[in-house]
Image: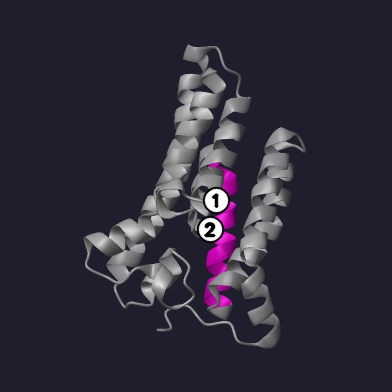
């Protein structure tokens, strides 16, 4: 029962879509109504409000980190194993993709995945962040940076932490992230994918 409670709280935390929350608070249009239609920092940036995009990125990443960090911190007090952090990592990520509070219309999970990875192992998170930044700077295409990072994240995890449950968890997150980017894959192949900072 305690395990289910941890997972439920992590999912509900993931269901807080900061793209929508920040946009409403700052009087901006709903990010699901323009551009890519994705409630994420990249789409919020299309409004030209860098502060709103930054807050969205920070909020979505922070909830991923908090879910994992809290699970790790509280697990011993409830007699739970380290594995609860992995379950909460998946739950908060799935909550972001399919948020209960926003009709299950969530984002693609890049920022939340980063927060989760930083919570699981800061070095993995930093390696993924560096990969995303390098790809984004080189090509200025957010989805390409995200997909490249998703492909490498399980490899980074395996090399740094071994090929156990953590690597499997990261692989599942990476596969879900790639799945959520399926429309972007088509646009990348056809040369129609937008660049970072472009307006709708």
Q: Residue at x 57, y 17 (%)?
A: 80
Q: Quadrant of residue 178?
A: bottom right
User: Residue beneath label 1, please?
Assistant: 113
Does the image show residue 137? yes
On screen, residue 115 above or below 84 = below
Q: Horizontally, is 127 left or right of 45 in the view?
A: right
Q: Which residues are magenta?
A: 121-138
On screen, residue 98 above or below 40 = above
Which quadrant holds the C terminus? Answer: bottom left
Name the spot of residue 185 as percent of width and height, x first.
67, 74
Name the spot of residue 154 as percent of width and height, x first.
71, 49
* Circle 2: element type: helix
User: Residue beneath label 2, please?
Assistant: 110
Question: Which disc is residue 132 wearing?
Answer: none
- Does the magenta stretch mainly form a helix, a strand or a loop? helix
Q: Residue at x 63, y 73 (%)?
A: 183
Q: Horizontally, is 155 left or right of 112 in the view?
A: right
Residues 117 and 101: in front is 101
Q: Residue at x 58, y 79 (%)?
A: 139
* Circle 1: element type: helix
In the rendered image, residue 133 lying in the magenta stretch gets the answer: yes
Q: Quadrant of residue 9?
A: top left
Name the spot of residue 111 as percent of width and height, x first.
48, 56
Does the image show residue 72? no
In the rendered image, residue 182 lying in the magenta stretch gets the answer: no
Crowd band around label 2 with a 10 angstrom C-alpha radius: few (<14), some (14–19), many (20+)? many
Which quadrant holds the N terminus? Answer: top right
Dots 1 and 2: beta carbons under 8 Å? yes
Residues 155 and 81: in front is 81
């Amino acid at each position: 029962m305690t395990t289910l409670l941890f997972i439920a709280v992590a999912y509900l935390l993931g269901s807080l879509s900061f793209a929508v929350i920040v946009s409403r608070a700052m009087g901006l249009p709903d990010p699901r109504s323009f551009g890519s239609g994705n409630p994420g920092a990249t789409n919020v940036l299309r409004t030209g409000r860098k502060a709103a995009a930054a807050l969205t990125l920070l909020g979505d990443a922070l909830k991923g980190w908090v879910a994992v960090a809290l699970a790790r911190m509280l697990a011993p007090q409830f007699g739970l194993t380290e594995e609860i952090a992995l379950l909460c990592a998946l739950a908060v990520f799935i909550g972001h993709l399919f948020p209960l509070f926003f009709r299950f219309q969530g984002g693609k999970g890049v920022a939340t995945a980063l927060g989760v990875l930083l919570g699981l192992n800061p070095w993995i998170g930093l390696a993924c962040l560096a990969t995303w930044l390098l790809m984004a700077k080189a090509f200025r295409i957010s989805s390409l940076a995200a997909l490249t990072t998703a492909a490498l994240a399980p490899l980074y995890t395996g090399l740094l932490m071994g090929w156990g449950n953590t690597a499997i968890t990261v692989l599942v997150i990476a596969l879900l992230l790639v799945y959520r980017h399926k429309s972007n894959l088509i646009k990348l192949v056809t040369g129609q994918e937008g660049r970072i900072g472009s307006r709708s």
